[in-house]
Image (cartoon, rainbow, N blue to C red):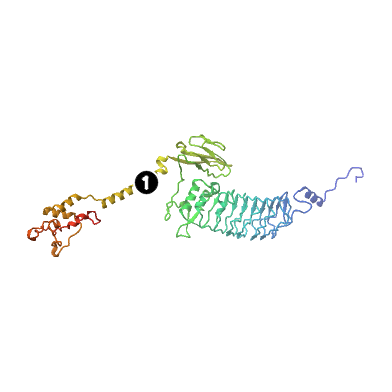
Amino acid sequence: MGTPGGAPSPPSPPSPLSLLLALALLCPGVSAGGSCPAHCICASNLLSCSQANLSLVPSPLPRFASVLDLSHNNVSRLRGDWSPARLPHLHTLLLSHNRLAFVSTEAFAAVPRLRHLDLSNNCLRALDENLFSDLGELEVLLLYNNEISSVDRTAFENLGQLRKLYLGRNRIARFPLELLREGSRLPRLALLDLSANRLREVPAGELQALPAWLRDRLYLHDNPLGCNCALFQLLARGRRRRLSAVLDFQEELTCHLPGSPHASVAILELAGRQPLNCSEAREAVLEAHLGDSVTLGCDSRWQDGSRHWVTPAGDRVMPGDGGGNGTAALLANGSLELRALRAEDAGTYACWVAGPLLNETLYVELLVHNFTLHGPHDTLNTAYTTLVGCILSVVLVLIYLYLTPCRCCCCRAAEKAPAPRDDSINSSVLSTTPNHDGGHGEPRPAPGGGPGQNGRFKGGGGTPPPAAPRGPKGQRKVSDPDSVSSVFSDTPIVV
C-alpha cells in the first residue's frame, strides 16, 4: 500500500521464523526433514555429538555422514545394531573417552569403509577373535589407555591396510608378534605402540628380523622388561641406525637387572655393566665365494621409497637394469641380486633410498673368497690330512709292538753251538721267561739237564760250573733256553 502522496511504503522487516527457515535451507548439512540427530551438530557431512552426555548412539544417522564424533560421552556398549542403516561413506568414527566395556564382533558391519577408528580412553579388557575383521580398509586404530590384558591373534584378521596400531597404556603381558612377520596379517603396519604395558620380555631375535621401517616406530618404552644382552644389542643397533623409537625414548627404555626386580636401569647403559657385561655387536659383513649368488638387502626406514644401488666400481643399478656386467639385478623389494660372483665384485655397495621426507643411504660390505684359499676344500683337506696321520700313527705303533727286529739267526746258532759262560750270561738278557729260583736266590737245574742246557756246559762227573759272581744287588738270573724262541710272543722283554 502506498502513502497518501503516492510514494511507495518501506518493506516490513522479516520475521524470526522466516530467518530460521532460510538458514535451514542454506545449510546442506541440516535438512528440513530432521536428518541431523538431536544433541548433535551437523556441518555438511560432519556429525559432532561430542560432550552431549549420551549413553546410546543417536539414531537415525544420515547416510551421507563421513565423520562421526561421539567422544566424551557415557556410551558403555556398542552393539551390532547401533546403526540400523548402513553408512557407506563413513570413514572416521571417534568413540574415545566413553565407558565402553563391550564391543560386538558385528559392530562394524554397517561401516565397511572405515579408515580411522578411535576407541581410546575406555574400559575395554579384551580384544576378542575377529573383532575388526569387517574393517578391510582400516588404516589407523587407537586403543590406548584401556584395560586390555588379552589380545587374540585373530582380532586383527583381514586388516591388510592397517598402518598404525596404538595399544599403549594397557595391561598387555604378551602380544602376538607373529602378526608382524613379513607376509603376515598386517603387511603394511608401520607403527606399533606397545608402551606402558606389562611386557617382561620380548623376543629380541624376532624383533631384529623385522624390517627397519617397522622397527623405526616400534615403541616398547615404560615396560617392566628384564635386562639381557640381546635386548641391549637390539636397541644399540636401533640407536646406530637412528631409529625414532629408540632415539626419542632413550631414558624411558629401562629394564630390571637380575636379582633387583625393583631397581631399573637404562637399557642402553648396560654396556660393560655388571653382572651382564654386555658388548655392542657389530654389523655382520656378508661373505661369499667365487661363483656364488648372493642377495644384498636394503633395510631402509622408508617402506615405499624409491631405491637404487651403486656398486664398488661406481655402476648404478636401477629397476630393470642389469648393472655393469649384467650379473646384478634390482629386485622388487629393493634388494640387489648378484650372480656368478667374481673377485672384483668384492667391496662396499650403497643402497640409495628416496623417502617422502628425507633420503637415506645404507652400506653393505661384501667379501668374495677364493675357493683355493678360504673355500670349503680347505676344510676337507685338513680332515683328510688328520685322518691319514692318525692311521699312520696306529700302523707304526703296531709295527713297534709286534714286529720288533731280533737277531734270530744268532739265537738259533747259540742253541746249536754252546757258547762260553759269558755268552750264556749275556744270552739271558734276551730271555722273557724268568727262572724258578730256589731258596736264597740260587739257580735250580732243570730236570734231565744235558750238555748245553741253560746256555752252560755241564762238566765231567756232573759237577756244575761255578755260579756267576753276584753284583751289588744280587745275582743275575739265568734264562731258560726255550724262552729264546719267545721273542715274537706278547710278553715284554726284560733287560
Q: Which residue is at the far left? A: 461
Q: Quadrant of residue 473?
A: bottom left
- In this view of the protein, which residue sits in the foreground, 237 or 339? 339
Q: Is residue 352 visible?
A: yes
- In this view of the protein, which residue sits in the foreground, 381 or 422? 422
Q: Is residue 99 visible?
A: no
Instruction: Answer few, some or many: residues within 10 Å of disc 1's Cα (few below 14, many 20 plus, some between 14 and 19).
Output: few
Vertical placement of residue 341 versus 147, above or below: above
For disc 1, the marked residue is 384
**182 sits to left or right of 17:** left
Q: How many marks?
A: 1
Task: Report helix, strand or loop for mark 1.
Answer: helix
Give residue 192's position: percent from left, percent from top: 57, 51
Q: Which residue is at the far bottom? A: 439
Give residue 259's position: percent from left, percent from top: 45, 60
- In this view of the protein, which residue sits in the foreground, 35 or 419? 419
Give residue 431's position: percent from left, percent from top: 19, 56
**373 sits to left or right of 139:** left
Give residue 150's position: percent from left, percent from top: 58, 59
**331 sits to left or right of 291:** right
Residue at the (50%, 37%) spot, across then down: 311
Q: Amino acid at mark 1?
A: Tyr
**264 sits to left or right of 405:** right
Residue at the (48%, 49%) spot, across then down: 236
Quadrant of the image containing the C terminus = bottom left
